[in-house]
Image (cartoon, grey):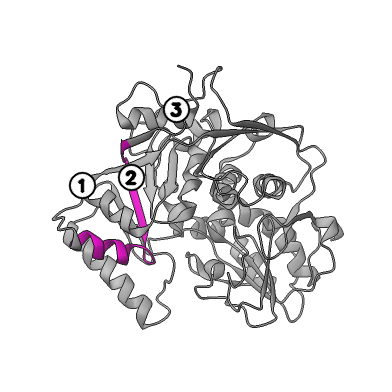
Amino acid sequence: MPMTITEKILARHAGLESVAPGDLVEARVDLAFAHDFTAPIAIQVFRQIGAPKVFDRRRVALVADHFVPNKDIASAEQAKLMREFAREQDLELYYEVGEAGIGHVLLPEQGLVVPGQLVIGADSHTCAYGALGAFSTGVGSTDFAAVMATGETWLRVPPTIRVEFTGTLRPLVGGKDLILRLIGEIGVEGALYAALEFCGDVVGKLSMPHRFAMANMAIEAGAKNGIIAPDETTKAYVKGRARWEPLWLASDAGAKYEKVITIDATDLEPQVAFPPSPANVRPVSEAKGIALDQVFIGSCTNGWLEDLRDAAKILKGRKKAKGLRLIVIPASPTILKDATREGLVETFLEAGAVVGPPCCGPCLGGHMGILASGERALATTNRNFVGRMGHPKSEVYLCNPSVAAASAVLGRIGSPEEL
């Protein structure tokens, strides 16, 4: 029976020859991930169900990334609870401030996610790992506690929507713009509980950071997971860092899809998502002139080294607009080191930016860049719902790193071409 890549991964992890959309399966988990915001509740439930030990101390990853360095007593207590649990369980994959970055960037970077895996995370953007050809999805903290205890989870096999991107990309247009374009077309519920399988010549030419951005934001269309079949680019990324043996899978020629969406990206401009939804998307040419109080470059979507390079190219020799706050947060310590070595950090500082330690920062309204009432921010993050980055009467617009950097100089949303 022909299957999609998502169906193949679920079938293998459920010990079945084949699965079909709608099937309920019990599947073995390769890696379980939580952070300082979701792990504390999961740990409490873990103790309530009487589990003595996690299913595998080598396959439960806990990363302090949301409210670190701790912003207040409550966040310090959460981090402490997670730290003590990791010590008690002797977890190999516990990452503390200084060695931790944003989990969705850190785990692939450390070779902990490889093609063909089934990864469960207590965070909605766990779907980012699908860029490597893994099945990865987010669950609630209670479900995550059961995963930690048993190493298994139950899933309903999702139908797959195949999204083919054709044509040739214009300069300064990338994965963030492709996924925003798709969400703008199908809406935040357009792929509800479906697998979004990204393919086509355009996707095949994308680097890994651009692919991660696309898979990361599959959840913004309501998808269960986003996935890209591994190719030579994937193999090059995994080589030398994979801690487990990859499984190279692809969809069969006769696989059934719920629907096929084709998007010609040839004339695609950089995209901007207006508040209050990632689906409220317009080309940057229709967004010019919107004054800004803050620009944030970072997050699990666009805090990769390549993203920082793109921003630095625009900011080199320029200054941010007077009265505007520019915040740059590399997504991991390795990225911060490389950005420092390449002179990117100096470029940001010379431009008037503040560079923060690797963490989620203001993306979720956590800290290090909260918005006040009436303020407007442009961010390279993945979500812009009401109150996402602070006051419910603030506004958040989403874009790629090049547009963010150019807008920081202009003091308003604008295109790099204007500079």
Report if residue 53 is visible in the image: yes
The residue under label 3 is which amino acid type? Answer: Ala
Amino acid at the residue labelled 1: Phe
- Left or right, 333 with respect to 74, comes to right
Q: Label 1, label 3: how many angstroms apart (C-alpha)?
A: 28 Å
As measured in the structure, the alpha-carbon distance from the residue carrying label 2 to the one carrying label 3 is 23 Å
From where the camera sits, is residue 318 visible?
no
Disc 2, SS? strand
Whole-percent x, y for residue 91 in the image: 23, 55
Give the residue pinned by disc 2: 31
Height in image: 323 above or below 22? below
Residue drawn at (26%, 66%), measured in percent from left and top? Answer: 83
Mark drawn on residue 354: none
- Give the quarter of the image for residue 123: bottom left
According to the image, label 3 marks what residue?
Answer: 20
| Secondary structure found at label 1 | loop
- Image point (35%, 82%), residue name: 73
